[in-house]
Image (spheres, rainbow, N blue to C red):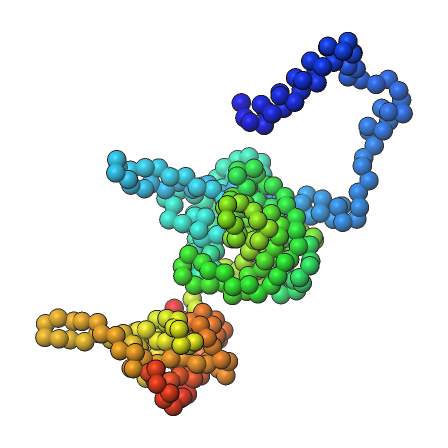
Amino acid sequence: MTPLHRMQKRFLFPVAALAALLGVTIFLGVDEPCAQEATNQQAPRTESEQQIIDAYRRTNATVVYVTTKTVGVDFWGPVAQEGSGSGVIIDAERALVITNAHVVGKAQQVEVTLANGLSYAVKVIGLDPDIDLALLRIEKPPADLVAVQLGDSSSLEIGQRVLAIGNPFGYRRTLTTGIVSSLGRTIPTESGRTIADAIQTDAPINPGNSGGPLLDTAGRLVGLNTAIVSRSGESSGVGFAIPVNLVKRSVPDLMRFGRVLRPKIGVALEDTELGWPVVDYVLPGSPADKAGLSGVRRKVQMGTVVRTLIDVTQGDFILGVNGREVRTKDEVLEEISKTKEGESLELSVRRGTRASKVRKVTVKPELG
């Protein structure tokens, strides 16, 4: 018996006992026509309420319950581990589902349960850990799949009402509502990168909501719920979603390559207390190497041993990208990611910690 059931019994028993002690008869029905008629009347709905009801009716069947099974190892040997989250169907014809990369992780087995209660095996088509996105395909899907309509996250405004549907704590296709609290938030992902354009919402999001849709009141997908800020691990009214426009850009690459190809120049960057990111390491033969960038970390052959030396005086600090001043490595990576195929970018760099001359370096990123 659940605590909820126990609570209900404790509440009902004293009422019945009190009625018996007082000799009061409790009538379960009322014969008066006016009272009976009142119970059959539907409570009036505001235009806003009806809008939310209609949006839920149109979209709840597009939400799936994602379950995963992974075999781990502890002191006693193999241990089965289970996980769960949410997802949303974005293409009914091809049976494509999106969810968070952290929901499926490295699971050996992934299933989705549809609104009809039936479960289906899925194949992980691709992962984009940089924005915490996973693309799944339902194996042997039913013919009556329903896909969500994709919206435009660039048109969102702070204060706009949004809806979240997911499976918090396993309660399937639960609806919560709120507003867009802010736009352009920067949140970390498990890959070590950050999402620089996340949607912040106060719609209650709890464990199990990850990977579920954030919708506008027309029922269009505007974001994918991915993270919360909480001291308890439960909703505190500060949740974040991946903008659907980022999802749109990633899905074609996930379909074709199983990953997302992004512009890269072949450097590892580190933030510093000096206020500018420094090049930690340059990959040999990379665009950055060809452009003459230098990192603080270098491998040196000493006899038969290869050692790694760190020399801050030989590292390039990046002060700007394409004319924009940068202060962190994430800002540098964000600017690099905007480079279109075949385009070059201009870096403002300074060698070492001393006030050396700032120079301009042109680098042509490669997709990878």
Please report the residue visible at 45 percent of the width from the left and 58 percent of the height from the top.
189
Quadrant for residue 142, please give it: top right
User: Is residue 148 among the parts visible in the rendering?
Assistant: no
Residues 51 and 20: in front is 20
- What is the residue that sits farthest to the bottom in this orientation? 357
Q: Which residue is more in the foreground, 283 or 250?
A: 283
Q: Is residue 65 left or right of residue 74?
A: right
Q: Position of residue 109 (x, y in %)?
A: 39, 42
Res. 82 in view: yes
Looking at the rendered image, the quarter that the C terminus falls into is bottom left
* Residue in view at x 66 percent, y 61 percent: 158
Taking 152 as reference, is 363 above or below it?
Answer: below
Left or right for 141, reference 351: right
Residue drawn at (71%, 44%), measured in percent from left and top? 53
Quadrant in the rendering for residue 128: bottom left
Residue 23 position, x and y percent, is: 77, 9
Q: Is residue 32 left or right of residue 285?
A: right
Count of marks, rendered view: 0
Relative image position of residue 252 (x, y in whole percent)? 49, 61
Q: Nearer the viewer, residue 108 or 46?
A: 46
Quarter of the image where one finds residue 319 = bottom left
Identified at 40% across, 59% down, the residue is 191
- x and y, in percent, of residue 331 in the image: 47, 72
Q: Is residue 269 above or below residue 94?
A: below
View extreme (left): residue? 303
